[in-house]
Each structure stands twice: as structure tokens, then as C-alpha cells.
């Protein structure tokens, strides 16, 4: 059984969401994600862009170890990833709903003046096509539809649209698959790509955040803490009452319950989610510092997690045993899988270092924004996207230092790495970052 020190990375509310799709769709989704940057969930988006559907599994494998949840641009890449066994985290996709169809139909009329009654549509369910046409008052009897059912469906989409166009039945094809749209355009079949609306993408992103949060916190798990007071001389009864009062006060703040265990110890029962909040993402043990400051004693604390109260209590006893024997009055947590985490009793130096790192990063971001404003390179509106070359020029530093700076901002959630720009020349494609100015307050 291995023991590692807990940190806020990978245990609390900070989520890493992989956005999987073609580069343009991924970029749009990441810009829309900024709408949630100041919400209750701390998260960052990671671009997982591919050029061809065959590349999805490889691109996912490259970044998946750091992901908590995946958001796919549609059902096809989602199903291809599942079929390839490339998914090991919760995932969802942006649905091809009626709203996406409405927008494409509007473009067909405004941009091309097409007759909406002579259209072929793939991917979207027939029922949703009929509903959309009914709502805009256009008969759908002659509209041809080929629904998406599984990853093999797109292989029939191209011939479906092309044959209808050649026969004169349709004048426009609507497809959700970029590669199909490209081949149809090359064959001189008029085609429009069905793209989800921004509102649909926002809803899907919110769903992904909830999926990831639920998976990470596993709210249904029970957390049981055992707090044990040391044997001391003097009025132990008064000390015990004071400890009980302090624990009750702490428990009220985290929605927990305090129960006597024996003459020297208490149970504190809570959900995992409330424990995460009370421990600052498992960076500090609950109760310990306050008990030491107000009562002048070092308590032993063991915390156990489990799907049932019995399992959590057994793990708490194991954790308490570790706390008793380590000689440092440190606290331990044992998870439902038997994994042991050390919660240091005096983590203030490490916490201060983390806070200092973020403070420095925020100051650096402010300095970069000021430099952009002075150079008249800060957009009046919309996302702010930079690369290492731009940062190096603005801050008068080397490109290598600029890359390190942007990586640091990305790790702290102050910048999001965008899909690499396409390039036809040699060398690595230029990497851009979206600066999260929303998090400057």
C-alpha cells in the first residue's frame, strides 16, 4: 500500500475537460467555455483536435491521462472513440439537435436561396426534421433523411446525397460530417455543413462539467472521520466537552454529524463533497489546526471513504492506526480502494508556496495585458489569443522563456491551450493560448 501526499491537483473541484473535434470546432468550444470561467467549478479546457476521424484514438491517447471528462463535437467522434476502446473517462457529445438544423436551414435560404423542400439531410433524426419543418411552416414530405445510427452510418452519407442530387430530386445536401461535405463539394454537389449552435455547445459543456464533477467527487460516497483526543492529566472531562463543542461547531459548517465513539474519540460523518470543501481539496486536515490553537492539544485523525457507512468506518479505523503510529501527529485518509493519502498537520508552507505561485502568475498575466494595451494589440472585444512569439516580443524575453510562461499560466488555469495552427511548412505548428482575462476579477 503506497502513501502519497495529497494535493489540490486531481482531487478537488478543479477539472480538466478534453474538447475533441476538428480544430475550428474545438477553438469555438474553448472560446465559449470562457462563459463559465467565473462559475463555481474550477476547470480548464484541453484541445484534442484531429484532422481525420481515424486520428481520434491517437490524439486522445496523447492527453487522456490528464483528463477528467471529454466533450466530443458530435456523436460520430464519440462513437469512434468508444469503438476503439480509447475512452477511460466520462464523456458526452454535442448533440445534432433541431437547433443546429434551424441555423443551417436559415443559411440555406439567406446565402443560397435554396428550396427547403428539395433538400437531403443526414444524421438528424427524422422526427426532429419533421418538427423543425412544421415549426417554420414548410412541408417536409419530399425532404430525404438518412439518420445517424452508428459509426458506420457516414459511409453511406456521400452516396445518399450524391444520388439524390444526380437524379434531380434535391438541390442541396445538409451533412454533419466534414469529410463527407468535402467530398460532396469536390463532386460539385451543393452542400452545407450542419453545425451546432453556440447555445447547444454551452449546454453540452455544462453537461460535461457536471459529469466530470460527479465522477471526481463521487458525492454518493460516505466520509467518516475518527477524531481521537490524547490522554492528558488534569480535568480530562472538561477537555472532552470542549473538544465536542468545537467539533459540533466545525460540523455545522460542513453539513456533517458528530457522534461519540468512546471516552476519547468521536465520529464525524459527512459526504465526500463536503469533506473536499472542508479540507481545501484535501490540502489540509479538518479540525486539527483549530483544536491545536484553541485547546492546545494534538488530536489523531483518520478519515475513511466508502460506498457504505460500514466500509467508510473500517477505512477510518485503518487511517487512525496510521496516524497513531507515525509519530508526527499527521492525519491520513483511506479511500474506498484502499489508497492512502497523507494530510500533513502543518501544510502552511506548501499552501503558501501554491498561493505565491498563483499570485505571481496573475501578476504576470496583468503585465502581459498591460503590454498588449500599450502596443495597441489588445482586442476591444472577444477572446485574447497569443503565442510564444507574441509574448516574447511584448515582454522582451526569449521565445523559450515565453513558452515556459504560457505553460505556467495554462497549468494554473489562467490560459487555455488552443488547437495548434495548421502549417504546410517544416517544423512544429505554432501553439496559441487563450488568455483567461475573466479570472483576473
Image: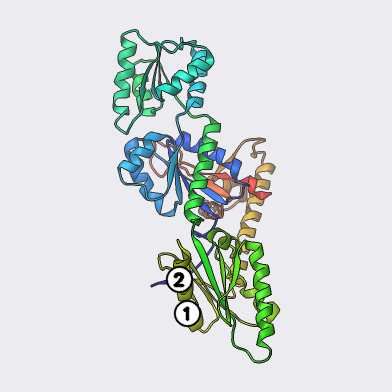
CB contact under 8 Å: marks 2 and 1 = no
**Residue 193 visible somewhere in the drawing:** no
Residue at (59%, 63%) from the top-left corner? Answer: 280
**Residue that extends furthest to the top in the rendered view of this protein:** 168
Residue 35 vertical placement versus 404 (above, below): above
For residue 230, the mark is none
- For the residue pair 320 and 185, the one nearer the viewer reads as 320
- For the residue pair 423 and 85, the one nearer the viewer reads as 85
Residue at (34%, 7%) from the top-left corner? Answer: 168
Q: Earlier in the sequence, mark 2 or mark 1?
A: 2
Residue 61, horizontal then vertical, whole percent: 36, 49
SS category of the residue bearing label 2 = helix
Q: Give the residue number, with chain letter if any, for mark 2.
A: 315
SS category of the residue bearing label 1 = helix
**Residue that extends furthest to the bottom in the rendered view of this protein:** 233
Tell whether 424 sits left or right of 278: left
* Quarter that holds the N terminus: bottom left
Residue 327, horizontal then vertical, whole percent: 52, 84
Residue 64 vertical placement versus 55 (above, below): below
For residue 321, the mark is 1
Residue 120 lies in what quarter of the image? top left
Residue 418, horizontal then vertical, whole percent: 50, 42
Residue 36 vertical placement versus 346 (above, below): above
Tell whether 142 sits left or right of 407: left
Residue 390 vertical placement versus 107 (above, below): below
How many angstroms separate mark 2 from mark 1 (CA)? 10 Å
Residue at (32%, 34%) from the top-left corner? Answer: 151
**Residue 132 visible somewhere in the drawing:** yes
- For the residue pair 25 and 129, the one nearer the viewer reads as 129
Amino acid at each position: 500500500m503506497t502513501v502519497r501526499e495529497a494535493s489540490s491537483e486531481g482531487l478537488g473541484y478543479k477539472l480538466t475537460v478534453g474538447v475533441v473535434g476538428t480544430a475550428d470546432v474545438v477553438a469555438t468550444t474553448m472560446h465559449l467555455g470562457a462563459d463559465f470561467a467565473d462559475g463555481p467549478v474550477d476547470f480548464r479546457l484541453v484541445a484534442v483536435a484531429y484532422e481525420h476521424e481515424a486520428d481520434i484514438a491517437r490524439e486522445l491517447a496523447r492527453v487522456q491521462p490528464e483528463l477528467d471528462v471529454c466533450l466530443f463535437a458530435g456523436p460520430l467522434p464519440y462513437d469512434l472513440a468508444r469503438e476503439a476502446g480509447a475512452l477511460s473517462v466520462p464523456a458526452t457529445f454535442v448533440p445534432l439537435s433541431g437547433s443546429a438544423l434551424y441555423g443551417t436551414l436559415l443559411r440555406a435560404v439567406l446565402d443560397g436561396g435554396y428550396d427547403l423542400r428539395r433538400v437531403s439531410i443526414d444524421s438528424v433524426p427524422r422526427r426532429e426534421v419533421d418538427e423543425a419543418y412544421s415549426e417554420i411552416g414548410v412541408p417536409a414530405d419530399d425532404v430525404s433523411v438518412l439518420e445517424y445510427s452508428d459509426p458506420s452510418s457516414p459511409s453511406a452519407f456521400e452516396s445518399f446525397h450524391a444520388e439524390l442530387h444526380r437524379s434531380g430530386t434535391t438541390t442541396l445536401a445538409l451533412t454533419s460530417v466534414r469529410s463527407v461535405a468535402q467530398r460532396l463539394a469536390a463532386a460539385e454537389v451543393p452542400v452545407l455543413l450542419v453545425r451546432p449552435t453556440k447555445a447547444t455547445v454551452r449546454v453540452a459543456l455544462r453537461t460535461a462539467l457536471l459529469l466530470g464533477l460527479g465522477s471526481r467527487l463521487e458525492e454518493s460516497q460516505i466520509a467518516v472521520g475518527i477524531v481521537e483526543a490524547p490522554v492528558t492529566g488534569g480535568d480530562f472531562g472538561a477537555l472532552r466537552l470542549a473538544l465536542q463543542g468545537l467539533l459540533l461547531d466545525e460540523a455545522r459548517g460542513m453539513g456533517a454529524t458528530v457522534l461519540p465513539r468512546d471516552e476519547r474519540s468521536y465520529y464525524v460523518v459527512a459526504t465526500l463533497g463536503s469533506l473536499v470543501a472542508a479540507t481545501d481539496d484535501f490540502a489540509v486536515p479538518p479540525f486539527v489546526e483549530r483544536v491545536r490553537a484553541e485547546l492546545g492539544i494534538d488530536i489523531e485523525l483518520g478519515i475513511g471513504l466508502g460506498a457504505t457507512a460500514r466500509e467508510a468506518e473500517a477505512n477510518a479505523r485503518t487511517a487512525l492506526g496510521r496516524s497513531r503510529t507515525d509519530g508526527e501527529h499527521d492525519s491520513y485518509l483511506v479511500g474506498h480502494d484502499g489508497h492512502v493519502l497523507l494530510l500533513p498537520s502543518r501544510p502552511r508552507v506548501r499552501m503558501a508556496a501554491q498561493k505565491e505561485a498563483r499570485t505571481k502568475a496573475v501578476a504576470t498575466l496583468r503585465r502581459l495585458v498591460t503590454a498588449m494595451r500599450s502596443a495597441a494589440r489588445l482586442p476591444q472585444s472577444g477572446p485574447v489569443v497569443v503565442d510564444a512569439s507574441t509574448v516574447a516580443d511584448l515582454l522582451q524575453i526569449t521565445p523559450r522563456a515565453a513558452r515556459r510562461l504560457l505553460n505556467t499560466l495554462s497549468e494554473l488555469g489562467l490560459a487555455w491551450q488552443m488547437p495548434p495552427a495548421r502549417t504546410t511548412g517544416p517544423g512544429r505548428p505554432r501553439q496559441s493560448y487563450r488568455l483567461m482575462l475573466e479570472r483576473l476579477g
